[in-house]
Image: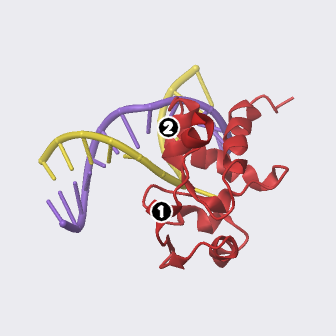
Chain colours: A red, B yellow, C purple
DNA sequence: AAGGTGACAGTTT
DNA sequence: TAAACTGCCACCT
């Protein structure tokens, strides 16, 4: 049973799924929510397996601190991540989220309530 | 078992 | 001001 490792991934996926439509989050924010025990890199790494996770993890809503679609390459198509974000109502400019600061969603805020 | 990698972030030069 | 380096820590070979 090599599913033991999903223990960490599951947590990341859960937070990613909590991201409301039309909003985006950053790896660092999620990592910090988890306790910054893994670091932002691990969050992105977990997303690498998100493609085979159910339900579909909105990895496209997760971008780096700069609002840049760093993981677009890991999607079916590079444009797919941008297209999905646009469907969410998010504007992408030069592979970067427009008004990222305004669309930024922090998991801590959702739990802070 | 050990080393290298990585969808990042923060700090320093 | 921008650019470069290090730190993080789990996963993969």
Please give the name of the residue rendered at 49% of the width and 79% of the height, measured from the top-left corner. Answer: A93
Q: Which mark is residue A39?
A: 2
Looking at the rendering, in which quadrant would you find the N terminus of chain A?
top right
Left or right of residue C13, residue B7 in this image: left
x and y, in percent, of residue A107 in the image: 59, 43
Task: Name the residue at the front extreme.
Answer: A113
Please give the name of the residue rendered at 67% of the width and 77% of the height, measured from the top-left corner. Answer: A83
x and y, in percent, of residue B11 in the image: 24, 40
Q: Is residue A39 visible?
A: yes
Q: How many marks?
A: 2
Please give the name of the residue rendered at 60% of the width and 60% of the height, measured from the top-left corner. Answer: A23
Q: Is residue A42 visible?
A: no
Q: Residues within 10 Å of mark 1 (few under 14, many from 20)?
A: few
Please give the name of the residue rendered at 64% of the width and 65% of the height, measured from the top-left corner. Answer: A22
Is disc 1 placed on a helix, strand or loop? helix
The span from disc 2 to disc 1 (Cα, nearest Å) is 24 Å
Same chain, marks 2 and 1? yes
Question: Chain ID for label 2?
Answer: A
**Which residue is identified by label 1?**
A102
Quarter residue A10 falls in? top right
């Amino acid at each position: 049973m090599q599913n033991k490792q999903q223990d960490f991934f599951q947590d990341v996926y859960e937070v990613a799924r909590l991201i409301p439509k039309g909003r985006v989050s950053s790896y660092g924010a999620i990592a910090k929510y988890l306790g910054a025990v893994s670091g932002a890199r691990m969050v992105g790494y977990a997303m690498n397996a998100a493609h085979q996770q159910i339900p579909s993890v909105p990895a496209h809503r997760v971008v780096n601190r700069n609002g840049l679609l760093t993981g677009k390459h890991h999607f079916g198509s590079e444009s797919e991540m941008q297209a999905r974000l646009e469907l969410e109502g998010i504007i992408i400019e030069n592979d970067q989220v427009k008004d990222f600061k305004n669309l930024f969603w922090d998991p801590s805020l959702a739990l802070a309530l």
